[in-house]
Image (cartoon, helix red, strand yellow):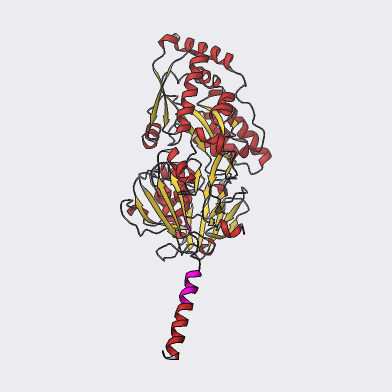
Amino acid sequence: MPKFLVIILILFNFLGCSQKKEKAPPSSELRISFKYNPLTVDPKKNSDPLSCSLINMLFEGLVKLEPSGEYSLALAKSIQISKNKTRYTFHLKDSYWSDGSEITALDFVDSWKQILSPDFNSINAYFLYPIKNAKAAKKGLVSVNEIGVFAKDKKTLVIKLEHPNPSFLKMLAFTTYFPTKSIEKFNENQKTNLSFSGPFVIEHWKPNDYIILKKNPLFWNANKVKLDRIHISIIPDENTSLELLQTEKLDWIGSFFSPIPQDAIASSLKKSNCKSKDTAGTSMCFFNTNTYPFNNGNIRKAFAYSIDRDEIAEHICQIPVKKAYRITPSILQGTKNAFLIPKDSGSIAKELLEKGLKELCITKEELPKLVFTFYNSDLEKTLASALQNQWLKTLGVKVSLEMLDVKIFLDKLHKKNYQFCLMSIIAQYFDQMNFLERFTENGSNKNFTGWENKEFQRLLDLSSECLIDSQRTPLLEKAEKLLMDEMPVAPIYHHNLTYIQSSKITGVEISPIGTIDFRYCQLIDVKETSK
């Protein structure tokens, strides 16, 4: 055999062996699950925490809330604030939509004007009300062209406020303030080439089955995004998600978009891969104050006072939650969990019920059929059953339970087509005001209770003009006490986010309001790191 052929064969064998010895790079596809199909991917129409989670993966705002509770610049490169705190000038980074076009100040202006158009349905439009003329435009009193926002040039966005607002910069991190482009053309049944500004884009979506996201190479901070893909399985059954995690077919479960089954929480908390973190959320009963008999304040207080929060926190929730005697959690207050509802208030509840019945001129037996509504989740079902038993035990009142699909449930709340229900408020920005402002007006999309109080409105208006915490906090405290005195909502417990993650995951960020951020998540080779 010729020498040159022998050399070629040796080289061929050598290269072949070398290739066989090379290790394939570890998978960079994160596998998570959602309990239900997201209701929207449009930041302007965001209506629920699960949809908000997806939107945060796909879009970016001017600023971003960090795990520390501080805010970092995102699409904004710098901010200038006028001396009177009513004019904000944002200089934008060089950033691009996923279709390659530049993200400009006009994208923000157009998105916000659309939200504030009177005929555009956005339940979070009130987030924009700090902007000059925003509320008036939404009510059709002025043109959207009179809103205090304009593009000085393509990289300079100017915002004028009605008055100084200490919460404004915090609000900018919420999805309603994210710019959009052509999102109205989205069709989840087809592959999409829509424009996104966040760390990921939608590669494919099979409704009620799965969503595949892929890395957005044009994201402004793409070099720090390590994942190639996120595979999201739509799994309504919580036990199925847990089984898939245990068999290494999912990498992460937890939070509101993929809850851990109630009966598995206690055992899970004993494991090192299960973690928990206090977050700014509160579970509570909402009363429809426009519906008999909950149009009576003492009836509402009777049901609120008869809740055994000790039993629920220690035996029902399983996770380490904090009992709630006010609606705003201490993580936002920065103070102790003040008792705006008395502890051990069962005996007071009976007195309040009798007082309410006398005011309505009826007996307990003449109460109408009471239906307590909640959405289909293991925790909600367990909690609703516990409340049903407590009301029967303490008040002697029978309550029927109604469990609904989350979309139908939210529709009933928005239409105020319910008597009372189990619901949570999850902070959308890191400020106590976020819990209180939804109750300012009867007609507000998120004021499911229909309650309204002029003094409450006045206190919140005054607090919005205070830039010093020592002046602002007492006004908010007074407003919350008034709310608890009239009891359109009954707080039960403050949230704790519990989750389980694979040992190969690192870099998941969780904000104080419970936002799960996978943008800097990384899958590591556990075998390699253990050597």
Q: Residue at x 59, y 37 (%)?
A: 462
> Which range of residues does the magenta coloring cover?
15-29
Residue depicted at x 50% and y 74%: 18
Tell which of 347 and 457 is nearer to you: 347
**Residue 3 drawn at (x, y percent):** 45, 90
* Residue 369 vs residue 159, the one in the foreground: 369
Is residue 454 shown above or below 65?
above
Q: Residue furthest front?
A: 1
Residue 232 in picture, x, y percent from top left: 42, 50
State yes or no: residue 20 in magenta: yes
Q: Relative to 233, does residue 358 appear above or below in the rendering?
A: above
Residue at position x 38%, y 49% from top?
Answer: 210
Where is residue 141 shown, x and y percent of the image? 41, 43
Q: Please tell me which residue lies in front, 372 or 444.
A: 372
Q: Is residue 65 visible?
A: yes
Q: Is residue 455 visible?
A: no
Q: Quadrant of residue 416?
A: top left
Q: Say if the magenta span includes residue 57.
A: no
Residue 237, horizontal then vertical, whole percent: 41, 38
Picture quarter with the C terminus: bottom right
